[in-house]
Structures are given as structure tokens and as C-alpha cells.
Image (tube, rainbow, N blue to C red):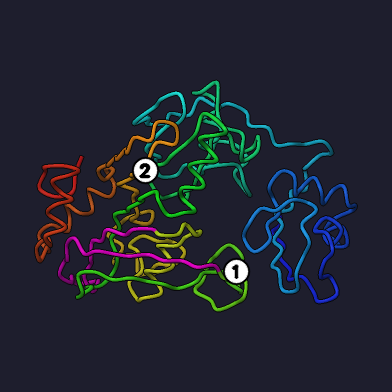
Amino acid sequence: MTLVQREAEQQQAGQRLDSVLALWPEFVSRSAATRLIEVGQVTVNDQAVPKNYRLAPGDLICADIEADLEPGSNLRITPEPIPIDIRYEDDDLIVLSKQAGLVVHPAQGNWTGTLANALAWHFDELGQAQGAERPGIVHRLDKDTSGLMLAAKRDEAQIALQDAIRQRTVDRRYLCLVHGWISQDTGLIDAPLARDARDPYKRAVSDHPSAKSAVTTFTVLERFEAGRFDDGYTLLECKLFTGRTHQIRVHMAYIGHPMVGDPIYGRRAVKANRGLQRQFLHSYSLAFTHPATGVDLRFSDGLPADLQSLIDVLAPLSAGRTAEGEKIREKIGDGSSFSH
């Protein structure tokens, strides 16, 4: 597997994507380029597009090239008996709590063992609006981000829920623990994101023409005093108004408060991460209007054991919860801190 990215040149303006890809040395033919587009492994400006997409100068083309992709391959999902935690289900949609370590859909380095494979095992009918390789998928969480997600059983529900996310009518909130002491109780980060010029797997705040709007708000829930090997911590509720890849992780690092345990955007001081083996980020609240019934639905999900354990360890260093912190504790648990 090789990730290759290039910008469309001035002389390629108006040319079809598959025609331009066929000229890349990594492809042996136009049909090989077309197959990769059809299985969702080519993006332009971080968005999947059809093979007949007409390029504009500066468009960022990114291709995940799979050497073993055979002619006629369509990356059909193989059902796998992977446990998933279903919180709600009806004829149209599913609300589940994704465990950390589970990739949402097949992609580079994870062609099996994904949430999509699990959904295909547990449900006979799933929306196909995203293609056969992403059955039921409405939106994504990073592999090591846990918590609430939506999936769809019907194409109509899948399309409607994705539209609702784009129109910012789905309320998605996260709990995250960051390094350092954030003094203000609330904040807004409005900083466009694009692929990192030095590492195509990462995202970065950017003013590049390909950068996309990214807006995150945060509310402080609890602050923790500094210890011997750290500069303290702040527990936040973050709300997404857009859903860019790694958005909260990049935004928090951008303001100087990277997420505890984040292996990509966080701090390398192992002791400051208090032993946490993944980013402290949990999708704890999800609210939306049912696309078929029009009923407003709201779900909440307490911290999983590994994140709760870290909060318990830090409890003696707590400087106290804010009023919002107390409200959320009451909503998702009545323990000594944020718990099930």
C-alpha cells in the first residue's frame, strides 16, 4: 500500500480525473485508475468524487494504491462476528457506541476487521448510498476514538442523516482531556484544515485553497493541578460544527493544548500521558431528528473504563468542576466523577 498525492497542474484544468491518474507512473492503465476510484481509494481535496470529475488547477489528488487490487474488484464487505454495542435500533437507523481500536470502514492497512464488517454481520439490511464497501456508514470516528455513532439501514435514512450532518443539525459532543490549564470557561476555534504538506496522513490548520472550514467549540468541565511531570490538565466538552478528519485533535493542538495520549498530535512525554495508550476523546452525546418519524432523539454515553480510570487517578488534583461539568456528570452518571 502506497499513499500518493499530487496537485493538478494548470494544463490539466478540465481534464477527467481517471485520465489524469492514468498518466501517473503508479498506474499501468486507465482501467486500473478507474478501479481505484470506484472502490473509494481516490479523493480530490479530501472528498470522494466520480471518475469523470473535471479537475481544477491546484486540486489535491490523493490515491491509496493497493498493489493486490485485481481487475473487477469491488471491495465487497465480508461479514465478521465483531461485537458491537447497540444503544438504539429501529427500521431505519442504528445508534451504537464504538469501542476504541475499531476502524470504521475498510481503508489503507485495515481491509478487514472494521465496523462495516461488523455491521454486515449483525444486520441483513444496511444503506448502500456510500457504496457497497461502506454499508450503513453515516459518519466516522477515528480508530482510537470511542463513543456514539450513527448507522443507517436504508439508503433514504443514510442520505438524510448525512445531509443533516452537512447542514449542522446533528448535535455531536465529545469529552476530551487536554494538557495544560485552560483559564477561560468557553472558547471557539475557527481554523480551516487541510492535509499536512509534510505528512499526507495528518491534518493541519492551513490557508491553502484546498483547506476546508472547521469549527469547534469547547466548554471547560474540570481542571486539574499540575503534577511533577506535567503542567496540569483540563477536561472539556467539545462540540463539532463541522466534521473534518482529526478535527478536535488538530484544533486542540493548534491552541497549545494537545489531547492527552494522542500519538500523532500530542506530546511525547510519556509520563505526562499518565499511561494512556490512545487519545482521550469520547463521543458522549448525540442528538438529531429522526429522518423518517421527525422525532427528536438524544443519546449519551459515559466514559469507557480506560478514560474513566485516568479521571479517577487525577481526582486528588481536581480544582473543582465548573457548573457545566456538574450538569454533565449528572446526565451521564452519578459517581464521584464522569462515569457510567
Crowd rating for badge 2 (residues with CA inside 10 Å; few <14, some 14–19, many 20+) = many
Residue farthest to the right, as pictured: 29
Q: Is residue 187 magenta?
A: no
User: Which element is circle 1 on?
Assistant: strand
Image location of residue 136, percent across then percent down: 54, 34
Residue farthest to the front, as pictured: 294
Q: Quadrant of residue 303?
A: top left
The chief SS type of the magenta part is: strand
Q: Nearer the viewer, mark 2 or mark 1?
A: 2
Image location of residue 132, percent across then percent down: 65, 34
Q: Is residue 236 magenta?
A: yes
Task: Count the numbered circles shown.
Answer: 2
First of labels 2, 1 by sequence position: 1
- Report the residue at 52% width, 69% height from top: 193
Image location of residue 287, percent across then percent down: 33, 44
Residue type at mark 2 is Phe
Residue farthest to the bottom, as pictured: 207
Question: Mark 2 to mark 1: distance in Å?
Answer: 35 Å
**Image quarter hosting the C terminus:** top left
Name the residue beneath numbered marker 1.
199
Per the rendering, the mark at residue 218 is: none
Residue type at mark 1 is Asp
User: Which element is circle 2 on?
Assistant: strand
Crowd rating for badge 1 (residues with CA inside 10 Å; few <14, some 14–19, many 20+) = few
Question: Magenta stretch?
Answer: 212-240
- Report the residue at 82% width, 52% height from top: 33
Per the rendering, the mark at residue 288 is: 2
- Report the residue at 24% width, 71% height from top: 229
